[in-house]
Amino acid sequence: MERARKHELVGELNATFAAAASIVVTHQTGITVAESTDLRRRMREAGAGFKVTKNRLAKLALVGTPYEGLTDLFTGPTAVAYSSDLVSAAKVAAEYAKQNNKLTIIGGAMGEQRLDAAGVQQLAKLPSLDELRGKIIGLLNAPATKVAGVLQAPAGQLARVIKAHADKQAAA
């Protein structure tokens, strides 16, 4: 690869890393073209991306980004999953790694917060932004009586305690 093309690739990777909210670093050995295409399709559908990287170029691209501390993870057959939301890349990578043992998660980061493989797995278990939006909309669409019932419950309990205390005073 000629020098100008390498410089261009480093610039593209640097822009990708700078814009990403989270990065998952993986080792992928023996993944076929069909499997790689399937993984990339899943990533795109989730709003994430997946790139096989040259370690030397990736290390250069990490400079000046919040992910600079990940350089030691770039050894061996490395690929990077990234997304603009915190959960998508980790969720898809973890799901794919369960199904295909040719992909191994070795670490990652959310901004400057470095994660080991277990941390990435925990991140993958969090609800996605779309799931959280759905829950909020569900709460907003709940009938007003449910909201009123929840708000009145503490007041009703307080009234029962006062009544019980008054009954106790009257009996004595």
Image (tube, rainbow, N blue to C red):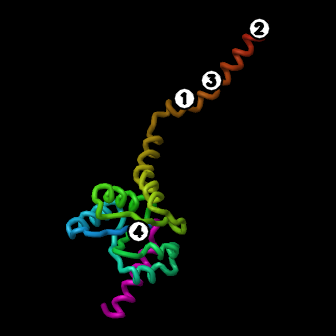
Q: Nearer the viewer, mark 2 or mark 4?
A: 4
Picture quadrant where residue 79 is located: bottom left
Q: Nearer the viewer, mark 4 or mark 3?
A: 4
For numbered disc 4, what is the local secondary structure? strand
Nearest to N terminus: mark 2 or mark 3: 3
Label 4 sits on what residue type? Val
Nearest to N terminus: mark 4 or mark 1: 4
Residue with the mark numbered 2: 170
Front-most of 30 and 145?
30
Q: Bounds of the magenta span?
A: 1-22
Residue with the mark numbered 1: 149
Picture quadrant where residue 46 is located: bottom left
Nearest to N terminus: mark 2 or mark 4: 4
For numbered disc 3, what is the local secondary structure? helix
Residue with the mark numbered 3: 156
The quadrant in which the C terminus is found is top right
Q: Position of residue 166 (x, y in %)?
A: 74, 14
Q: Position of residue 30 (x, y in %)?
A: 25, 69
Residue density around tag 4, few if under 14, some if 14–19, many if 20 or more, within 10 Å:
many
For numbered disc 1, what is the local secondary structure? helix
